[in-house]
Image (cartoon, rainbow, N blue to C red):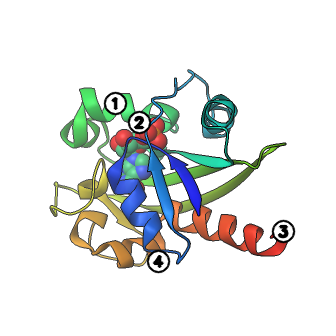
Amino acid sequence: MLYFITSNNHKCAEIRKLTDIPIVQRDLSYPEIQADTLQEVAESGAEYCYPRLGEPCFVEDSGLFCDALRGFPGPYSNYVYRTLGCEGILRLVSQNRNAHFASVIAYHDGSEVNLFMGEIRGTLAETIKGEKGFGFDPIFIPEGETRTFAEMETEEKNLYSHRGKAFTAFISYLNQVR
Ligand code: IMP
């Protein structure tokens, strides 16, 4: 069993499809520090959560990085999604539509924090497409595809996604150490 500390049910549903290990979701409402990197945010989240839960656990921090905006919104993606939304991002980019998603999983095993990263490059769609998923899924087309994440089933998104890659790296680490 693994504790995943998140308030985001979508993230949890995606991760559950990637493993047979039971994933127990806990929402500890940990404070997300303001930092320039996902790594710092995730690491401080895991350090906050472990002593409160009293069990090994992981958190995940992710974001959308737009080339035209020099990586914005990046670690501020959650706030930017809530304020500008998908439409706002599409209005901000015009010529250069390249972007990537990144995910960092921070696992606190009771003595230390280990980080696992995943990235997927892609392009921003011209318009919002699809109803599945969450956040910026309707505007992100992963490399090698013509559809947005929001037009894919979870299993398919997982094959490409930043979170799928980070979580797969985490599971292979656990298989080595356990
Ligand atoms: P946080 O990891 O809770 O800080 O939130 C990251 C934000 O980035 C989310 O609220 C989404 O807006 C966006 N985001 C991260 N991963 C994804 C994804 O897989 N699909 C769509 N949006 C994402």
Mark yes or no: residue 118 visible. yes
SS at mark 4 in the image: helix
Q: Evaluate if marks 1 and 2 touch, with contact meaning CB atoms under 8 Å apart.
A: yes
Mark 2 and mark 3: Cα distance apart in space: 33 Å
Residue indicated by mark 1:
80
SS at mark 2 in the image: helix
Residue indicated by mark 2:
77
Pinpoint residue 34: horizontal percent, then vertical percent.
Answer: 56, 21
Give above or below for 66 relative to 158.
above
Say few, some or many: other residues with alpha carbon within 10 Å of mark 3 (under 14 / 14 to 19 / 20 or more).
Answer: few
Which residue is more in the foreground, 115 or 140?
A: 115
Identified by mark 2, the residue type is: Ser
Outermost residue on the front side: it is: 54
Mark 3 and mark 4: Cα distance apart in space: 24 Å
Q: Evaluate if marks 2 and 3 touch, with contact meaning CB atoms under 8 Å apart.
A: no
Mark yes or no: residue 97 visible. no
Determine if the C-beta at disc 3 is less than 8 A from ligand 1: no
Residue indicated by mark 3:
177
Determine if the C-beta at disc 2 is less than 8 A from ligand 1: yes
